Image (cartoon, grey):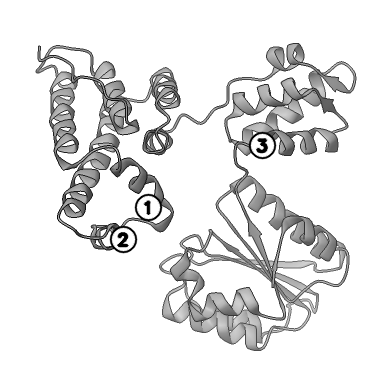
Amino acid sequence: MKISPAQLAKQLKGPLAPVYVVSGDEPLLCQEAADAIRSAARAQGFGERQVFNADASFDWGQLYEAGASLSLFAEKRLLELRLPSGRPGDKGAAAILEYLQRPAEDTVLLIDLPKLDASGQKSKWAKALLDGPQVQFVQIWPIDAQQLPQWIRQRLAQAGLSASQEALELIAARVEGNLLAAAQEVEKLKLLAEGNQLDVDTVQAAVADSARFDVFGLIDCALRGEAAHALRMLDGLRGEGVETPVILWALARELRLLASLALQYGQGVPLERAFAQARPPVWEKRRPLLAKALQRHSSAPWNQLLLEAQRIDAQIKGQAEGDPWNGLGHLALAIAGQRLPLPPES
């Protein structure tokens, strides 16, 4: 049965379920949900703990044995199964299904999963977790930009603090979706705040710029058409010391994909089929981003930008004049839909 993190807190006050699943893409919230389950298990006498990391070489027989054996010290047990890929394979699926049919007595099984995509949710083992009567499936959803100020307000309230709306929006802008950074800033404000009320001046003095300026975040930002934000992220990457070849590699890879998809789409191939036929296939959660970007240019402009990427590569290697950072900015703006002329040849 699917439950939210808020419902989990209420459920953990009573008898524990035989199986819990924590699934999502937000590390902080997933960690906190798993920590809450561990804490409740300890409080209810589950004193023995075993952790299984189900990587590609994992022996699924260990889960069979754990389910069939008694606790070494005749105590209640917490078993943790961590499945970072989200795909257990045939042997893993069979092991999970068998365990769900006969959950071990005096045992809680905690399964840690990334967010399951649409195809993953249709698998037999995933359906058994989602719909199983003895399973509490905790679905963790990301906190979007509009929800972030309210989420920060709640974290501050838990710390005994309140803040003006302007202060909340400033914290949200500084951490830019990084929930771990936001939680850390709340802890810092607990120590630095004078009194319980936070204003803009207090936040400006205390909160560092913790925005995540990662390369793939830059690409997603450009695909969404957020040109100014993309340039800010590029500037942040430069300030963090990220090398130009790393950024160019990521942008060029995306441009090659966009050029290929645009060519197929222009030839009448439906986008969904083009996404599926790409090598590797395009993840479902990225398809809306790419579809939005493909509305901005046909195949020829994407290929022209690939030529520009080659020119930037020559600049990086010292084989052409010009500042590669300016060229990277142009590529990011072009992907975002800014119709700017290409830089003149040197």
Q: Nearer the viewer, mark 2 or mark 3?
A: 2
Q: Could you say where residue 314 lies in the image, as x and y percent from the top left?
A: 13, 23
Q: Could you say where residue 180 lies in the image, as x and y percent from the top left?
A: 63, 37
The amino acid pointed to by label 2 is: Glu
Above or below, comparing residue 75 to residue 159 in the picture: below
- The residue pinned by badge 1 equals 287
Q: CA distance from mark 1 to mark 2?
A: 8 Å
Of pointers 2 and 3, the one earlier in the residue sequence: 3
Q: Could you say where residue 277 lies in the image, as x and y percent from the top left?
A: 23, 62
Relative side of 331 to 226, left or right = left
Relative side of 292 to 74, left or right = left
Report the disc number at residue 272: 2
Of pointers 1 and 2, the one earlier in the residue sequence: 2
How packed mark 1 is, by other alpha carbons closer than 10 Å (few <14, some 14-19, many 20 or more), is some
Kindly state the secondary structure of the residue where label 3 is placed.
helix
Q: Nearer the viewer, residue 161 or 220?
A: 220
Cβ–Cβ below 8 Å for labels 1 and 3?
no
Image point (71%, 55%), residue name: 33
Relative side of 282 to 65, left or right = left
Above or below, comparing residue 137 to residue 60 in the picture: above
- The residue pinned by badge 3 equals 148
